[in-house]
Image: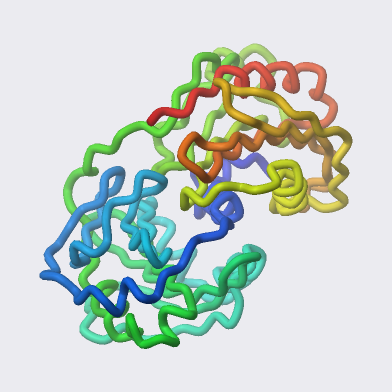
Amino acid sequence: MTGVWQELAESLPRHYWIFWICAAVALSIAVCSFRSRSYGRSILRQAPGSRIALAVDETFVPSDRFAGFVHEASGASFVLIDLPLVAFEQFGKLGNAAERLKAEGVGAISRHLLPSRGGDYIYFRGEQTTPVRDYAKYILIFREAGATGMVTANIPVAVLSSGAVTEARIETILASATIRPATAEAKPLFSMSYSGPFVEDLSLLGTTKGYRLSAAAMANGGKGREPQPLFLVAPSLAGVPVTDLGEFARRAFDGIEQFRDKQLLETSRAKIDGLDAVEAIGRGTDGGTGRPTLLFQVIVAAKKGGYFRLLGLAPEDARGEYLPEFRKMARGFRPLD
């Protein structure tokens, strides 16, 4: 890694790819609800936490886990991500985007035209297998109003197979996507009572939050660190309870992207704000620089199902400096209802 936060300014923000890993959770399905309820009147609706609006009907409700809409009974969802304008050019390299998505478990990626959609856009379809369900993925990236919008429709394959929802319907919704002048107000999902030498990077959009070294910390010896230490907090995409938090934490650690030769050195159970949590500490080799890196992860069970994933990365030779900070930040984490 040549410095995650430096790369954020130069190309597609890397944390959005980490976000996909963090969001690889099981979603419930109830096909009968699609059969029993007809689509309501579709109007442009803007999800909290995003500038993107979609013509999605009232059977989909705003998610309290991410910027987007979810059909709670079936597990179908539309995930919205606001990105800088430069991201569109990065996604334009389909081969690069496909390789990135394959690393996240999205396969059978193919590019298509989107009926009735004009302007600058990229549209492709894919598939994703999770431990609980298989999903069809419909991904639209478009450029508008000085920004890039990304809309991902995650539809359980069983729902499509039943005919309860059709590909044509999904594409009609995607074709309606537009970027509005301002972000719709969203309720915070968590708070941090301690951030140590880190400050929130306010340029990062979406429900995943990133924290980088403050200017003072950089001036006080942090500037020369490669890779730069960082801390991420990502919520799950759904409120499905994690039945085995320890096993889930181990699988999540193995799935930390961009690092090879990962070693899980220790795990421990904890309570964070009264919630069950599992801390995992290890190391890995940065796939870009080949440098040893401290990997710190905490999975916190959310109050109403699902989880929060806290991830700290720092140079291995700075483990003694940053591991205590990461632990304090995790202990100061507070989910909000």
From the viewer's perspective, is residue 94 above or below residue 268? Answer: below
- Picture coordinates of residue 90 (x, y %)? 49, 63
- Picture coordinates of residue 74 (x, y %)? 40, 67
- Picture coordinates of residue 208 (x, y %)? 48, 41
Which residue occupies 58% across, 37% down?
Answer: 301
Q: Nearer the viewer, residue 9 or 27?
A: 27
- Picture coordinates of residue 258 (x, y %)? 72, 52
Which quadrant of the view contains residue 310? top right
Q: Is residue 139 left or right of residue 324?
A: left
Q: Is residue 337 left or right of residue 316?
A: left
Which quadrant of the view contains residue 312? top right
From the viewer's perspective, is residue 168 above or below residue 273? Answer: below
- Residue 228 visible in image: no
Q: Nearer the viewer, residue 257 or 8?
A: 257
Snapshot colouring: rainbow
Q: Nearer the viewer, residue 151 or 223?
A: 151
Which quadrant of the view contains residue 86? bottom left
From the viewer's perspective, is residue 214 above or below residue 73? Answer: above
Which residue occupies 36% across, 75% down?
Answer: 32
Q: Is residue 192 left or right of residue 279?
A: left
Which residue occupies 49% across, 79% down?
Answer: 157
